[in-house]
Image (cartoon, rainbow, N blue to C red):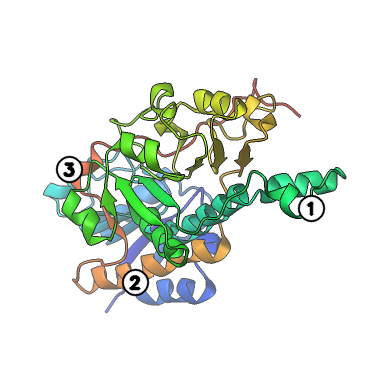
Amino acid sequence: MSKPRVIVDPFPRTMSEIFSEPDLKRLHDLAEVVWGRDDVMPAGEFLEALPTADVVIAGAWRDHYTLDGAAALRAIIDVSGAFPLDLDIDRCQREHIRVLGVAPAFGRQVAEMGLALTLAVSRGVVQGDREFRHGTERYLHAGNTDTFLLHDQPVGFIGYGGISRALTELLAPFNTTISAYDPWLNDGLLRHHGVAPASLDEILTTSRIIYVTAVPTSQNEAMLSREKLELIRPDAVLVLLSRTHVIDFEAMTEMAAQGRFRVATDVVPTEPLAPDHPVRSVDGVVLSAHRAGSVREGLWEIGEMVCDDLEAILAGLPPARLQNAEPELFRRYASNTPPTLTSTQETD
């Protein structure tokens, strides 16, 4: 009996980036892997393989991809971290093709970075290191005039998905009180997760630590406007872990420079960030170059989840580890890909 056929076209990810050696072997044991290389699968080869493919595993829904003739297709798995927004989700529903994403693989690694950024700001780690290297270090109490303990602080989440839930677990030893604002979740579900439901304004005005983890949607662009940012208490730390889509980044930069509040961010408006962007020179901001979700062991969790759910799908069972594209939410998602500098903006 022949194996099921799976198209694996992960670009811009690579095979070794998302599959550990054991999971790569498991993938080949489960199915006949078509393509399975690091560069983009040519259109002709994709179209030739599609009619007999049971599953497509891809880094994007490419221009030359189609559902026409996909007679055996049972699932599309996007390994980018976001759903392919140009995919016809209604047709997938009609033809009983599951659309799955790997966002759950990023929860733990982004949560770890969120905690690291929080402590870096609250305990002045980056500023203290900078002063030490310049010979201006301040010892003992003098070096702690602007620091505070994370223990017992009020924490607010803007968005309460997988990253926030993983971060909540990491915060447990600190005995923080946690509130969350998420218009996609009802109050009962938030309470079920052990957090207090709150309005956006309540989060901004009462939290000492504010985590922004909301997924970009058509409804939340610049949700954290200048007006909303002005509500943040002056001793607070804003930790930005999702995308700059949800915040007025320039207003945030300006207000941090004025000392209105402190910021730690893993994301910026363009990648790479323009060399002259003012946020680079603000002492009250800790910057990270979109590194929260790119740890080797964390990325291998993508391959583990893909293999686990692929095994289930091929056995006629529902997937249990990947994120299902819910039609009610799919249509609301916005692009999750940060823009890049154009060639005319790039500098040496």
Q: Give the mark toward the camera: 1 or 2.
A: 1
Dot 1 or dot 2, earlier in sequence:
1
Task: Kindly report the distance in space between the C-alpha atoms of the residues bearing marks 1 and 2.
Answer: 52 Å
Task: For label 2, count other residues whose C-alpha is less than 10 Å away and answer few (under 14), some (14-19) or many (20+).
Answer: some
Which residue corresponds to the image point at 69% horizontal and 47% vertical from the top-left?
126
Residue 241: x and y in percent read 47, 45
Q: Is residue 168 visible?
A: yes
Kind of residue indicated by mark 3: Glu
- Work out which residue is located at the far bottom of the displayed protein and give it: 1
Residue 108: x and y in percent read 45, 62
Dot 3 or dot 1, earlier in sequence:
1
Q: Are marks 1 and 2 in contact (CB under 8 Å)?
A: no
Kindly identify which residue carries mark 2.
308
Task: Write down the quadrant of residue 260 in the picture.
Answer: top right
Kindly identify which residue carries mark 3.
328
Kind of residue indicated by mark 2: Asp
User: Relative to 68, is 220 on the left or the right?
Assistant: right
